[in-house]
């Protein structure tokens, strides 16, 4: 688990048959951004732009268009397929992990999800899984962070490989990390497309113009897991 920082039901539009890999949805809101109706303070887009100009740090408050894009993506994918919103200042939103995030950390939390799932499968008499590859990861600042990981895992008995989604809540200190979602990936899915807004396209190396193409410029699969405490 980190020392500091940063199987739920499918959404109605893509709900597959129930499996043993699903768990009950946590009461906490892990969608990020919260309810826009509650946080709206009557600010116009023009007044937001004025504030952005005052701070002059290159960041801007999320526009209504960006919020709409973000919330639709979170509702559709439960946070696993969310577009990068470049140069945005917003607290608590889910975003693709950038190239500076240690790949071994991402893989470590993928292993935690696999271990948790295998414990459940063992009790139910199901086949064990082996982690093959971490495809991508989205992150949400929390306590300290939520990891939305898309991965490939192999059935240890049959050798069949499938894609899965796992959401792991990293905890601080001696608290145990929690796996809140583990399920097969519902295909096809949009793989972190860039958000098209008036502020320009995403400059992320993991945002792609073709929704059907997985970003290959950043590999999260770096071999053996190494423990890294922040």
Image (spheres, rainbow, N blue to C red):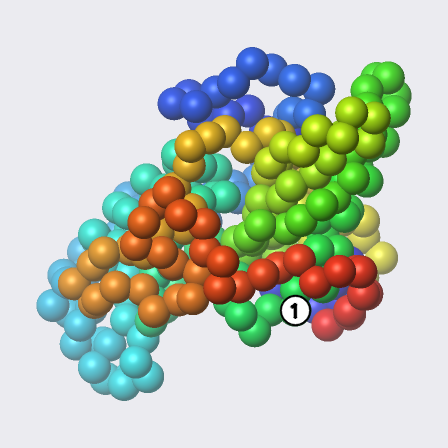
Which residue is most to the top? Answer: 17
Quadrant position of residue 103: bottom right
Check the image and report above or below for 125 versus 197.
above
* Residue 5 visible, this angle: no
Instruction: Name the one closer to the observer, 128 or 167.
Output: 128
The residue identified by callout 1 is 102
Q: Residue at x 30, y 80 (%)?
A: 58
Where does the image place residue 117, in percent across and percent down from the top left?
77, 33
**Lateral position of residue 17 relative to residue 188, left or right:** right
Residue 10 visible in the current orientation: yes
Residue appearing at x 60%, y 69% in the figure: 101
Residue 180: x percent and y percent? 66, 37
In the image, residue 106 lies at what x, y percent? 66, 58
119 or 157: nearer the eye? 157
Picture quadrant of residue 9: top right
Please state if 224 lies on the left or on the right of 18 as rendered: right
- From this view, report whether residue 189 is shown above or below residue 197: above
């Amino acid at each position: 688990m980190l020392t500091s920082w940063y199987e739920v039901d499918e959404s109605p539009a893509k709900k597959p048959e129930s499996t043993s890999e699903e768990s009950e949805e946590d009461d906490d809101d892990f969608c990020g951004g919260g309810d826009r109706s509650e946080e709206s303070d009557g600010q116009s887009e023009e007044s937001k732009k004025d504030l952005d100009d005052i701070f002059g740090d290159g960041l801007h408050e999320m526009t209504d268009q960006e919020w709409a894009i973000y919330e639709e993506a979170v509702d559709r994918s439960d946070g696993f397929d969310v577009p990068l919103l470049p140069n945005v200042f917003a607290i608590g939103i889910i975003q693709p992990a950038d190239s500076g995030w240690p790949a071994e950390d991402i893989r470590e939390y993928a292993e935690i999800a696999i271990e948790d799932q295998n414990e459940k499968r063992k009790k139910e008499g199901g086949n064990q899984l082996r982690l093959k590859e971490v495809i991508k990861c989205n992150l949400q600042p929390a306590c300290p962070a939520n990891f939305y990981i898309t991965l490939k895992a192999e059935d240890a008995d049959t050798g069949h490989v499938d894609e899965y989604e796992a959401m792991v809540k990293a905890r601080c200190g001696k608290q145990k990390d929690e796996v809140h979602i583990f399920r097969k990936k519902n295909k096809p899915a949009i793989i972190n497309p860039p958000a098209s807004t008036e502020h320009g396209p995403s400059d992320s190396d993991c945002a792609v113009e073709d929704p059907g193409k997985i970003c290959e410029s950043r590999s999260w699969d770096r071999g053996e897991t190494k423990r890294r405490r922040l």
